[in-house]
Structures are given as structure tokens and as C-alpha cells.
Image: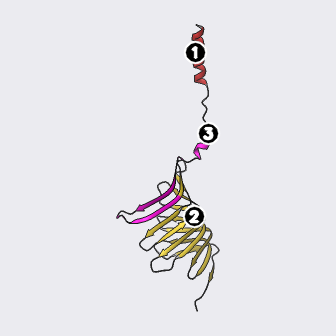
Amino acid sequence: MTAFAVIAMAFFWYKTAPKVNLLSTDSLSSTPDYFITDIKAQRFDARGKLIETIQAEQALHYIQAAKTRLEQPYVDRYATSGSWHAEAQQGAIEDGSNDILLTDNVIAVKKYQGSADILLNADTIHYLDQDKSLTSQGNATLTSTQGKTSAGTITTYINSEEVIMTGSVRGNYETIH
């Protein structure tokens, strides 16, 4: 009878003992669910034409934020009217989106067929796929053959030579003699 009582107490104690996790749920929510290193991904259109190449040292996916963070990303995007290349220290892509946010010392070169390249520098450059635009913010500058322009925000469109600048627009231009 005593053995039965001891077993019953041990079983009761085992069932009521609190479960201990090695990691708290807060720390798990801020860790990536997977990561990939040394990435080179290409995307093609329906006809098989290359439209985008993304390279990065590392990609970390966060399921709770529905976002992939890129470290040292290099992005090339191609269109019939030209292309652009950008590189930064960090980047982010939201799940289900073709938009790319590049941050920390971003440099982008936009190339048009038949025109001189333009260089964009900024703290952040956001490529919006729906608009086919690059929006530069934070120490944004545009350098072209005409000179150098800085503004609070510089938006340039991939399929045209249109550039919109807002917020403290300043430029230095040289005339050709």
C-alpha cells in the first residue's frame, strides 16, 4: 500500500511540475526561422528574360514580421528602357512583395539606353515594383553629367527619365563652354 501511495504522489508531482523552456518565447519571436548564406537569386519574366538578380552575404527570414533581412545586398533590375544596380549594407523584402528597401550607405546607378548614367546616394533607397521607382531619402543626392543635386527625397522612375525632388532641393551645376 505504501508503494502505491508513493507512486501516486510521484505521478501527481510529475503532472503538476511546471514545464521549463530553454528559451523564452520573446527571444524566439525575434530570431529568424531560417537563414541562407552566400545568395545569388535570379528572377525571369514569363518569356524567360532576366529581370532581376539579387546577391547577398546572408538572408534572414522572420516569420512573425513576414520579412527577409539581407546583409550586404547587391541588386540588379532590368527593364526595356534601362536598368539599375544598387548595393547597401542592409536590405529588407516583405513576404509576397517585389519591393526592396535598401538601408545604410546605399549607392544606386541608374542606366538609360542612349543617356548618361545617374548615380543616387542615400541613407535609404526604396524600390517600389508597382511604380517602377527608386525613392531615395536621408542625405539623398543625385549625380549626373549636369551636376550634383541634393534633396530631402529624390524619386526616379525606371521606365522614364523623370525625377521628382522634394524638401530642401539644392544643386551644383557646371556649364559647358
Amino acid marked by disc 3: Ser
Helix or strand or loop: what does disc 2 sit on?
loop
The reply to whether dot 3 and dot 1 touch (C-beta < 8 Å) is no
Which label's residue is closer to the chain start, 2 or 1? 1
Q: Residue furthest left?
A: 47
Range covered by the magenta-colored residues: 27-56
Query: Circle 1 sits on which residue?
Result: 8
Residue in the foreground of this view, choosing between 57 and 116? 57
Which quadrant: the C terminus?
bottom right
Q: Residues within 10 Å of mark 1 (few under 14, many from 20)?
A: few
Mark 3–mark 1 Cα distance, whole angstroms, equals 32 Å
**Residue 24: which disc?**
3
Image quarter hosting the N terminus: top right
Q: Which residue is mark 2?
A: 88
Query: Which of the two labelled residues, at mark 3 and mark 2, occupies the earlier sequence position?
Result: 3
Name the quadrant containing residue 168.
bottom right
Disc 2 marks a residue whose amino acid type is: Ala
Q: Position of residue 101 (x, y in %)?
A: 55, 61
